[in-house]
Image (spheres, rainbow, N blue to C red):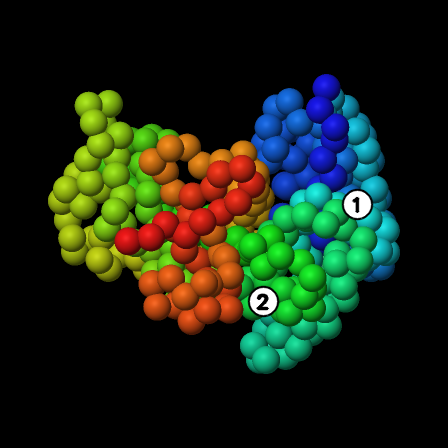
Amino acid sequence: EKEPVTVLVTGAAGQIGYALVPMIARGAMLGPDQPVIIHMLDIEPAAEALKGVKMELIDAAFPLLKGVVATTDVIEACKGVDIAVMVGGFPRKEGMERKEVMSKNVSIYKAQASALEKHAAPDCKVLVVANPANTNALILKEFAPSFPEKNITCLTRLDHNRALGQISERLNINAGDVKNVIIWGNHSSTQYPDVNHATVDTGNGLKPVRELVGDDCWLNAKFITTVQQRGADIIKARKLSSALSAASAACDHVHDWVLGTPKGTWVSMGVYSDGSYGVPPGIIYSFPVTCEKGEWSIVQG
Ligand code: NAX
């Protein structure tokens, strides 16, 4: 049997955390043969709720789950962690300026970055989910200078999957047959969902999405705004923000990063820019990437 991999989930008592930890414990993140130890971090006001989540993980009797730590202590949470999924953060509340949210998150991410730097495994891979995701990832990178830049990423896979979902609904096909959409930029409404290189596996070869949809008006307008605004639409419908789809996308992100992308397929990840496509180096930006042996590379050309 393989050695267990230790996965940290911060904000684990929240909505996304509640959907995410059972997925990890079932092997959706690291594979059906990979044992895991889950560390869950939350803050004091959520400590009781976090205990409840731990009880439920035990009650689910997951064969792959080799250990659970539920804590409000950042250092204990970060100890020996191989993969860190940063879901916790200070949410933007009604009437709050973006700047205020940022400054609250700066102090949270500063503390968590140093704890990870000192106590996590040296090659720990980090996925930031909490908003503003790109900015929080950058803050984390700034305050964990000894971490390889390549190990700090943010989640835009949810937007990527939303784009696949919209195309598959439109064409009445399976989402698994659509590939190579791209999310460029920020995880926010300024992102650009790009279908210009996307294809569909028709069972009879690959066909461009543009050709199959045959409606550039829809692709250039409604499709883009639907993907950009999907988060807001979910809130309208559920009165809560996306959770199961966010958790599932976090699993996809780490899964493909660690285990590799299939040949001929790329995915979208928020990563440290090396200047590709004229994007200023040093910011965290969503690009098309392929992954091999635990390393992502930006698709060129
Ligand atoms: P919840 O408010 O349900 O959960 C957040 C949890 O984080 C709470 O349990 C809270 O106590 C905890 N927390 C707060 N400060 C913390 C700290 N300093 N250390 C550890 N834990 C802390 O939010 P939820 O719906 O789960 O969303 C979590 C984050 O994901 C939000 O920032 C949200 O904006 C972001 N999202 C990002 C997405 C993406 O694609 N990148 C999509 C979904 C989601 O909106």
Q: Quadrant of residue 5?
A: top right
State the residue at coordinates (49%, 47%): 296
Report which residue position mark 1 lands on.
80
In this rendering, the answer to whether 244 lies above or below 234 is above
Looking at the rendered structure, the kind of residue marked 1 is Gly
Q: Quadrant of the N terminus?
A: top right
Judged from the image, the secondary structure of the residue bearing numbered disc 2 is: helix
Query: Of label 2 and label 1, which has the lower sequence position?
Result: 1
State the residue at coordinates (58%, 67%): 138
Q: Quadrant of residue 146?
A: bottom right
* Total numbered circles: 2
* Label 2 to label 1: alpha-carbon separation: 22 Å
**Residue 87 placement (x, y as % from top left):** 65, 54
State the residue at coordinates (69%, 32%): 25
In this rendering, the answer to whether 75 lies above or below 19 is below
Judged from the image, the secondary structure of the residue bearing numbered disc 1 is: loop
**Residue 290 placement (x, y as % from top left):** 42, 43
Looking at the rendered structure, the kind of residue marked 2 is Leu
Residue 108 appears left or right of 96: right
Report which residue position mark 2 lands on.
138
